[in-house]
């Protein structure tokens, strides 16, 4: 599980304001203000999470986290531990198992006048996590009955399906017509998904104060860089007289809206 900051480039908001001013003389800082508010609010939310972590339940913690960061790079380790929270049992194993199920899919070849398509038969494999008592054999071809039995006993969780090309080794079995099984790949992050609340609990448990402090410092550094780019003419990529007017005007706007005071307060926090 990787946590990345939600970087915001205020260059485009400044470019829009300059364009509007050069085109019709209007000074419109709405887009810039929205971006600055989003950045500072994210830093303030992160600080609140650092100082009052226990105040937030899992949903509130995640909601505030999304104001300044996002999570990606989920691993098998993460999924396995979320499932263990949900079922209160260990799922230490992972595998892709072959099944006796076959299905028909449309295959294509070429393009333009040489384009062709036809229906072809494929095998179905399943990416699973399994418990210590599942006795999964990666060389075995599992029938529908065997899969249902493992599911009923909570010994496997099916993450997703994979297509298998037929005609290779290990194809000596009685094939069965495709039957759809419930997969859980989308159930971790979908609101009201089967494992969504457990995912939020896992996130809460794994983002401690140390990680939040690191995110806060990085986010504050990003804010400072972005603010300098739109309030200091020396740091701006715009060098026209009209752009200098806009940058100077926004420097005043930044102070009048209280952004300068809020940012100064954040920079003077002792953590």
Image (tube, rainbow, N blue to C red):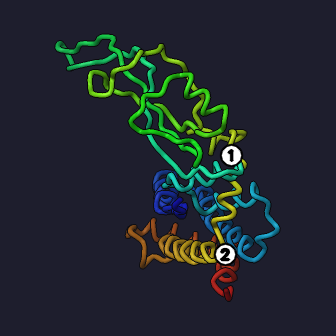
Residue 175 appears at what percent x and percent y? Answer: 42, 16
Residue 228 shows in this picture? yes
Residue in the image at 20% along x and 16% along y: 112
Above/below status of 32 relative to 165: below
Above/below status of 38 relative to 109: below
Crowd tier of the residue under label 2, counting other residues whose Cα lies within 10 Å: few below 14, some 14–19, many 20 or above:
few
Could you say which is closer to the camera, residue 108 or residue 60? 108
The answer to whether residue 133 is left or right of residue 100 is right
Residue linked to disc 2 = 209
Residue 29 appears at what percent x and percent y? Answer: 60, 60
Residue 27 shows in this picture? no
Residue in the image at 75% along x and 58% along y: 58
Residue 53 appears at what percent x and percent y? Answer: 76, 71
Above/below status of 148 relative to 243: above
Mark 2–mark 1 distance (CA, rounded to whole Å): 23 Å
Residue linked to disc 1 = 196
Specify the quadrant of the image occupied by residue 68. bottom right
Contact (Cβ within 8 Å) of mark 2 with mark 1: no
Could you say which is closer to the camera, residue 82 or residue 153? 153
Element under label 1? Answer: helix
Screen quadrant of the C terminus: bottom right
Q: Residue furthest left?
A: 114
């Amino acid at each position: 599980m990787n946590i990345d900051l939600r970087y915001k480039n205020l260059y485009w908001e400044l470019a829009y304001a300059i364009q509007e001013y050069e085109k019709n003389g209007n000074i419109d800082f709405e887009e810039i203000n929205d971006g600055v508010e989003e950045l500072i609010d994210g830093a303030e939310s992160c600080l609140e999470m650092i100082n009052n972590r226990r105040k937030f339940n899992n949903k509130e913690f995640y909601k505030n986290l999304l104001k300044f960061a996002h999570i990606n790079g989920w691993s098998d380790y993460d999924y396995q531990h979320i499932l263990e929270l949900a079922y209160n049992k260990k799922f230490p194993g992972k595998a892709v198992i072959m099944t006796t199920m076959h299905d028909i899919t449309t295959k294509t070849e070429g393009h333009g006048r040489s384009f062709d398509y036809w229906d072809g038969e494929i095998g179905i494999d399943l990416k699973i996590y399994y418990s210590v008592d599942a006795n999964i054999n990666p060389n075995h071809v599992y029938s529908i009955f065997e899969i249902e039995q493992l599911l009923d006993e909570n010994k496997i969780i099916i993450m997703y399906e994979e297509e298998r090309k037929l005609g290779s080794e290990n194809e000596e079995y009685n094939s069965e017509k495709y039957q759809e099984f419930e997969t859980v790949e989308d159930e971790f992050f979908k609101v009201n998904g089967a494992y969504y609340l457990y995912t939020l609990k896992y996130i809460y448990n794994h983002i401690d104060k140390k990680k939040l402090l690191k995110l806060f410092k990085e986010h504050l550094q990003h804010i400072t860089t972005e603010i300098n780019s739109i309030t200091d003419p020396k740091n701006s990529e715009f060098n026209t007289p009209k752009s200098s007017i806009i940058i100077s005007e926004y420097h005043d706007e930044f102070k009048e809206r209280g952004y300068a005071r809020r940012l100064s307060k954040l920079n003077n926090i002792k953590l």
